Amino acid sequence: MDQQEYARRRRELMNLMGDNAVAVVAAAPERPRNRDVVHPYRQDSDFHYLSGFPEPDAVLVLIPGREHGEFVLFCRERDPEKEVWDGPRAGQDGACERYGANDAFPIDDIDEILPGMLEDKHRLYCTMGLNPDFDHAILGWVNQVRTRARAGARTPGEFVALEHLLHEMRLIKSPAELEQMRAAAQVSAEAHRRAMAVCRPEMPEYALEAEFQHIFRRNNGWQAYPPIVGGGRNGCILHYIENNATLRDGDLVLIDAGVELDCYASDITRTFPVNGRFTPEQRAVYEIVLAAQEAAIAAVQPGNHWNMPHEAALHVLVQGLVDLELLHGDVDQLIADEAYRPFFMHRTGHWLGMDTHDVGDYRIDGEWRLLEPGMVVTVEPGLYIADNIPEVDPCWHNIGVRIEDDVAVTATGHDILSAGVPKTVADVEAAMAGE
């Protein structure tokens, strides 16, 4: 993403904030993995969205109308000795030259400098409740201003949740963001195709997971979330991540895995037979889920409300369960009674973007919000027939199927970003046969 994109976002946010306001956003802290080892660093999504700045120990400040520049960045100073161990830092010069800050100060000086930037502002925009240490720091800076009240300093009169503005911005993706998400989906598609090509009975689930990690890292990406690789009954566990069982001949394997590139996620699920050929029962369930997904994707249209794809998928799934005699009765009544929940217990999708379950309200004033161009959703219906569902013929036991794609809303319909992964029965079997 080029710096003009980040600058455009900052301008848009400051226009929404209005005059006499200030926004303060913290970088993500480093997270310890064990003793003196930290997890690979991933920047806070809001912080990255506004700056592209990749380092921890930083605070971003936006001050509309500030005479000396509206974008201020507090960050670590250059330190040649530490950089020998941990790599180069941007420092204050780099913050301005490479990341577009109008002013940059050492993070160690923030307690002295930032309170003055809060003086006489009517509104302070920030996100509270995610990082207790930063919450405490915000209150400390405001209290510093309060101690100068007798000298005429005034504290902000309102604390405003930054996410009300920023997350609505993040919900509508720019063309540059959509291209980044398409690139992520293409890398994930390559990994799913690879998994289909190499899958064999008696493989450990983690060996199949390793194919994803290889493709992700080869493309300078990281997993967007812990991959799910569930064979047989494990495919009926929605968030199964142990990935340590052996894939058995005759079972299905469900893989939910996506890469993150430059802080943008993909999220794709495919289900296929371990031995390369669907049994009649597996095929019957799979084709119901595929038809449900196709109906849901067709409902991803500008002007349709958020729940319409779910409603479309649900009707197909319940009709399919009736056709298989796993449910009995009128389809509409079964939906009203939620009789399907032993087989389908989750929603059909979620927002997708910088976070796998991305930000943005699903309802506005109690009503499902309307889909708009630039929104990206997942579409992921499924059926899960575990062996503990009473009165189900054992021939259906442990068939878990989910099919998920990443779909962008366009001005005229939709665009399936993850279209490069086989999903018809014929295409899946052909991919597994190397055709």
Image: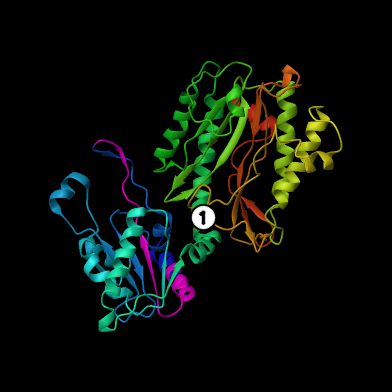
Residue at the (33%, 68%) spot, across then down: 100
Q: Is residue 301 above or below residue 429?
A: below
Residue at the (64%, 30%) spot, across then down: 428
Residue type pointed to by label 1 = Glu
Give the side of residue 284 with respect to residue 136, left or right. right
Residue 74, image x, y percentages: 27, 64
Give the side of residue 125 with respect to residue 287, left or right. left
Quarter assignment of residue 278: top right
Report the number of numbered marks.
1
Give the side of residue 148 with respect to residue 165, left or right. left
* Nearer-the-camera pick, 351 or 184: 351
Residue 31, image x, y percentages: 32, 44
Whether residue 433 is visible:
no
Range drawn in magenta: 9-35
Q: Is residue 307 above or below residue 74?
A: above
Q: Is residue 218 magenta?
A: no
Quarter assignment of residue 376: bottom right
* Nearer-the-camera pick, 195 or 149: 149
Residue 290, image x, y percentages: 71, 37
**Quarter of the N terminus within the rendering:** bottom left
According to the picture, the residue beneath numbered tag 1 turns out to be 179
Q: Residue furthest left?
A: 81
Residue at the (43%, 34%) spot, across then down: 213
Whether residue 383 is visible:
yes
